[in-house]
Amino acid sequence: MLSPVLCSDLAALEPEYTEADVISTVEFNQTGEFLATGDKGGRVVIFQREPQGEYNVYSTFQSHEPEFDYLKSLEIEEKINKIRWLPPHNPAHFLLSTNDKTVKLWKVSERDKRAEGYNLRDEEGRLKDLSTVTTLQVPVLRPMDLLVEATPRRVFANAHAYHINSISVNSDCETYLSADDLRINLWHLSITDRSFNIVDLKPENMEDLSEVITVAEFHPHHCHLLAFSSSTGTTRLCDMRARALCDQHAKLYEEAVDPARRSFFSEIVSSVSDVKFSHSGRYLLTRDYLTAKVWDLNMENKPVETYQVHDYLRTKLFSLYESDCIFDKFECAWNGTDSVIMTGAYNNYFRMFDRASRRDVTLEASREMCKRRAVLQPRRVCVGKKRKETDVSVDSLDFRKKILHTAWHPKENIIAIAASNNLYIFQDRLTANGHHNTPEIQSAPPK
């Protein structure tokens, strides 16, 4: 998977775009046939994989609208913070989407037939004059152009005082969690008027507040286990079998900070921005500002693997703090076999780390490269003055271009990269003998 990638068939966008067009979340469904993106304008775009392997737009709908909380005089943005797919059980597809305050359950279904020949209504749906109805007829189904409908089935609201940062569907397929800065709530998918608070970190006096929840995630196989991370760099594993309120964790994953490297920025850069269980359920992948770490669930004192994502930024922390870039929240992802991890960086770079060989590669998601249908060459960021012609100096990195949201196909070497308002889908193709060739990568049309 660490071989170069090729990008093609990327629909060109105009350089100008609005803030509402920026992609804020990317998520494959359980089979990888569908890929959903959400943006800051509250829209959800679903891509479907065609038989040829390319992803094309399947459905687009408005999930959330801007709202105003009159009691708190607070504007509620329509931005989609997270999307999570529910496991498929019938031809229709279900997904959860959330903004800062409200979670919605959507049903996405296809319709290629329509009923005709109603007794009491005409073809426009208007009620007939009953005095004109003299005979009864059996309605029939007529073929029609395929129509993809997205309908809201549930609205889960008024349960969070703070901004929702994550949602996660439980492996029991009946419940899910929603987490904000201080609380985690457990919902049943069929009940919208109440939820159960399972984690509450709010102190009696808000002046005593020392940490906030940054992300929460259910275990992929055990419905009683969940993990949540905080701004202090800790990740807690909770067991709902032990007690109803999970304030007391079962395990705490924390790495001691080297006193020699402690600085004003140590606590800020140690804040965990994303947590992902491995597909096997054995490991936890966490991402903080500078590193990605793999934890064995059975070992709490230190990670089994630590990967430096962009260690060259340690000398730039002050300027990154002044520009607020130090608070950027990068996501991370596992490949289908848990052998490679991926995460984003600046300058539209994203990084991959092979866990077995410890090899890593830096690649760039760029519209210019896709236009030329050129092979994406590995990138290298150089700190010193001596560098190759193809190297990029750390001083020339564009911190406005950042890869915050990534997703990996659950079974194949297909990755989705969100860069501002562009969506890139890279697919690693194999030769006839099963070996990696210069992979052909197609890109779905961006929003």
Image (tube, rainbow, N blue to C red):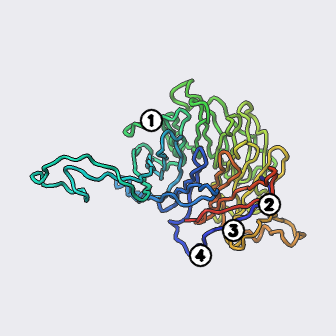
**Number of the label disc, if any, that sits on residue 188:** 1
Report which residue position mark 4 lands on: 15
Q: Is the residue marked by circle 3 packed among few (<14), some (14-19), or many (20+) residues within 10 Å?
A: some
Task: Identify residue type, mark 4.
Answer: Pro
Report which residue position mark 3 lands on: 366
The residue lying furthest to the bottom in this view is 15
x then y, percent, for residue 17: 54, 72
The mark that comes first in sequence, 1 or 3, is 1
Residue 141 is left or right of residue 374, and the answer is: left
From what the image shows, is residue 436 above or below residue 12? Answer: above
**Residue 406, quarter of picture:** bottom right
Mark 4 residue element: loop
Answer whether labels 1 and 3 touch (C-beta < 8 Å): no
Task: Identify residue type, mark 2.
Answer: Thr
Report which residue position mark 2 lands on: 438
The mark that comes first in sequence, 4 or 2, is 4
Q: Nearer the viewer, mark 3 or mark 2?
A: 2
The structure residue drawn at horizontal position 82% and vertical position 51%, both measured from the top left corner, is 435
**Residue 379, quarter of picture:** bottom right
